[in-house]
Image: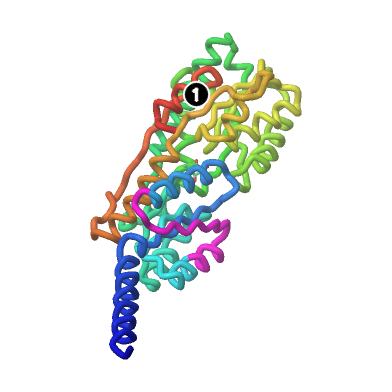
Amino acid sequence: MKNKIALGLKVLALALTLSACSSGGNDQVKIGFVVKQPEEPWFQDEWKYAEQAAKEKGFTLVKIGAPDGGQVLTAIDNLKSQHAQGFVICTPDVKLGPSIVAKAKADGLKLMTVDDRLVDGSGNPIESVPHMGISATKIGEQVGQAIADEMKKRGWNPEETGALRISYDQLPTAKDRTDGAIAALTAAGFPTANIINAPEAKTDTENAFNAANIAITQNPKYKHWVAFGLNDEAVLGAVRAAEGRGFRAADMIGVGIGGSKSALNEFAKGEATGFFGSVLISPKRHGYETSVNMYEWIKNGKAPPPLTLTTGQLITKENSADVRKEMGL
Ligand code: FCA
């Protein structure tokens, strides 16, 4: 009897040791994915692909929405208390750079940024933090070129056309994108004087609508409008504002950046819309690849590439399904 109990205890002890060992594998890696605007389809897609990486590699993903600086710092502490080893972040304000770097260091967490690159006190990118962003200027140029081509096709006189630059210049990638669009437009002969700056307070549709509405009201002389901004939401806001002022599909050419649900819903509408196209970028690369990079860093000590810039491709109502398929989306 005594022997049997002793054997039973031994078996139990062995079982406990084994279960502790099995959780010492991949499932102990925990990675945070913090985004500034969790309601935006782009960020939901990034999370979706980060989840895919978590499933494939067998780590735990902690998704956190942090729309302001206070919430970013709380999120980092929260990740530490959950025993995460690192996180990927798209910050609500790139100027939080030095605080985010300091906090991650104090909490012993590896840090990588996505979409929006952290800047230091002088506004220069913090190069020590690995980053994946889009090739902002190039993609902006694709937007401007698409608008110029479509204007030509419609035979619009540039002198009678106003361009809405929905701007958010405090974010370098946003400024680069809109500057790229202007460069391509003006290279195609668009008059600089007709480009109206319409600053938005936040990078969502509602704020873009308000910015565009003011700009259109203040510039009643134009017969047609074109619009560009840092993302699809900016351009959708401009398209809605133009509609409200009587500029419908035939008198508006808006080209966004993103190509996620916001753009696809617009393309799926029965009636024509001034939202002509979008430069599709890859939430898969930005969500899946950054998460795998972070995983490799934690698990195998392999640091991510210091800087990765991804490309984009123009989609319109006609070709969006095919191009998305090509991109593996
Ligand atoms: C920024 C924008 C997002 C998305 C991302 C790639 O974070 O705010 O809408 O375009 O870059």
Q: Nearer the viewer, residue 110 or 126?
A: 110
Mark 1 is surrounded, within 10 Å at the Cα level, by few (under 14), some (14 to 19) or many (20 or more) other residues, namely: few
Q: Nearer the viewer, residue 102 or 155?
A: 102
Is there any visible trace of residue 97 in the rendered image?
Answer: yes
Q: Position of residue 201 (x, y in %)?
A: 63, 47
Residue 162 lies left or right of residue 81; in this view the side is: right
The quarter holding residue 245 reads: top right
The quarter holding residue 156 reads: top right
Residue lying at 61% horizontally and 42% vertically, measured from the top left: 199
Residue of label 1? 321
Q: Which residues are magenta?
A: 56-75
Q: Position of residue 191 (x, y in %)?
A: 54, 22
Residue 37 lies left or right of residue 88; in this view the side is: right
The quarter holding residue 49 reads: top left
Q: Nearer the viewer, residue 242 or 108?
A: 108
The N terminus: image quadrant: bottom left
- Three-letter residue code for mark 1: Ala
Tag 1 secondary structure: helix
